[in-house]
Image: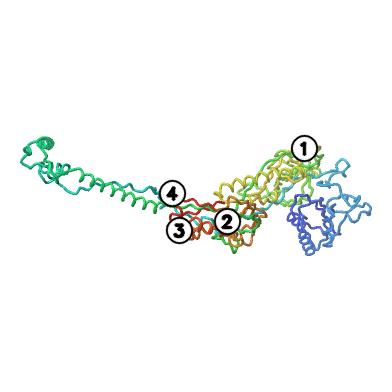
Amino acid sequence: MSSTKIINVLKDDSFEEILDLFKSTSAEEVIFVLPKSARAFKREEHFASLKDESKSLGKSVSFLCSSPELNDLAKKYKFDVLLARSSAPKKSVSRQTSSSRLVPADSGSISVVNQIEDFYSEPATSEDSISTSTAQVKEETSDDLEDDDSPNGRRLDDIFVPGTENQRNVKVYGGREKTIPVEIRQSDFSDEPLEHRALQEIKSVWGSRAIPTETNLAPKAMGWFSRTRRSLSNFKPKLVSNGFDRPRRSSHRIGLIAMACVAVIILGTVVFITTGKAQVTIKPASQPLDFSLTVFASDNTSAVSLTGMAVPGQLFNIQKTVSQDFIATGHVDVAQKARGTITVYNELTTDQPLVTTTRFESADHHIFHTLTSIVVPAGKTVSGKLVPGSKDVQVIADKAGSEYNVPVGLFTIPAFKEQGNTEKYQKVYGQSTAPILNGTSGQSTVVTESDLNTAKQTLTTLLTANIQDELKTQINGLKIINDSQVVIGSPSSTSPADATASTFKVNLAGSLKTIGFKESDLYTLISQYVDTQKSKTVLLDKLTITYTNPRWDEAKNGLSFTVHVTGPGYSKVDQQKIITDLLGKNDADMRAYLGSISGITSANVNLSPFWVRSIPNNKDKVQVDVSY
């Protein structure tokens, strides 16, 4: 007779564990009892792998599950689905070592979840049914984002770094050097005697005929002033007709005055010719501008390019992760069995097999069942001392409730005692190394979907702010237009929705990849475009620039965006040509010339000093200013 094996699959059991259990069983027919959501059969390849194994081992497989998706996959791979037999009457099924009851399907669904029937106990009553499964399942997480450090990426500093080591401050004085008059003497009497020098000075005043001879002077031993005064006191001039008289003194003064007038005239002429200057102020015509440009910024661009409509930029790639604990707000009526792991020891000299659902009794007389069948190896004698064989196995409480949360302790197998096999009862036993927990019943706090969404929104705001703050410390004055385009990954939580937990932790990762650029480079691009395409001149402080539609181009590793430009455009003014054409023109000529220039709304000419009536011929004396 063929044997049948029932494998109860829990939500957090992995497919590898279930597959190993399937391979190890000797039964020719295996029935898998699945909850509505099972990790072990989450993907289609699990059914494909099971199909291959069942075919190679020659075993038949059936599924009992309330999930339509899982049932459809089972049918796809030609497995028997027990729920399809909803009209079948109750019947008993023989097993090798135990007996169990199949639960009839009411409407193609099953209401019992996370409950394993004790094959040694009495049939379950309605009080033993469980309405909800709340076993905690830790979701698999994966990093959606990888570090994109770009060792080959360049920075703006790689493009242009202004030198500062050899710069010096030089103060330039605008004033001219002041001229110092120097007196030049026609004669030098420093080598002559004092008396002779005095005589020459007297002659220069009174004339040569009125000067006494040197014999009339005082001795040399007297001071120069005393000798001069004495000589003058002894001097008696002679009146002669052709001597020192008034007409000769007047003609001398007239000559000096005439020479002074000539000098003044010459000086005035020089001043008149050299001091004239002209200042011309021109107001060009304006025209409103309104246009848009699609600009590309990249660290692969070394200079402003009008043909490629590109500006150089610096790449920024910032990645951050935030985590925070949150309080669960959901409340549900739950019934969950405690579960854990014990180590089974065997002091017998033979191996001891234990079937699935073997009962173990704790020190406080609570019954637990094994989730898998095991074979505990026999004990060995090492150095004259018996070392028992051991095997770990997972156990689950017989019933739901917190009273099954037991501490670390010893576990016995009551079946051996009931059979009267005292040796096995004493030498085959279990020992836990950690408490068996998570047994609950009644109302419990659970994590809701709303709790997870609120946590994600909170962490998204925090993560975006952290990335923006990090970006501000790196941009160093560069323009960033998409700092809010932070890419947020999928959150990972320690407790999924509907899991029993009073608190849960959520992790969230995010990144921002963007390009920073100098606004001056963008202004240069706009000026070149207006100059070549519209033949106008623009003033950047009079323009209004808005940025729209920033898009990261992964292929070109750069940022594309649209700039909308509005403001006045002014007619071009060739200042140097106007200066050249105005040289030497009088009032009428300059008016006619300035009036003939197109694109000028007004012009004002200021000549100085007041006597200047024409434009100087020296370019350095003419200045043309443009007033926008």
Q: Nearer the viewer, mark 4 or mark 1?
A: 4
Distance of label 4 from label 3 (alpha carbons): 16 Å
Q: Which mark is residue 600?
A: 2
Q: Position of residue 422 (x, y in %)?
A: 76, 43
Q: Which mark is residue 402?
A: 1
Mark 3 and mark 4 in contact (Cβ < 8 Å)?
A: no
According to the picture, the residue beneath numbered tag 4 turns out to be: 609
Distance of label 4 from label 2 (alpha carbons): 27 Å
Q: Which mark is residue 14?
A: none
**Sequence order check: which comes first, mark 2 or mark 1?**
1
Local secondary structure at mark 1: helix
Closer to us: 307 or 481: 307
Q: Nearer the viewer, mark 3 or mark 1?
A: 3
Q: Position of residue 14 (x, y in %)?
A: 74, 53
Q: Nearer the viewer, mark 3 or mark 2?
A: 3
Q: Position of residue 520 (x, y in %)?
A: 55, 53
Distance of label 4 from label 1 (alpha carbons): 108 Å
Residue found 64% across the figure and 52% down from its top: 546
Neighbor class of circle 1 (other Cα within 10 Å; few <14, some 14-19, many 20+) is some
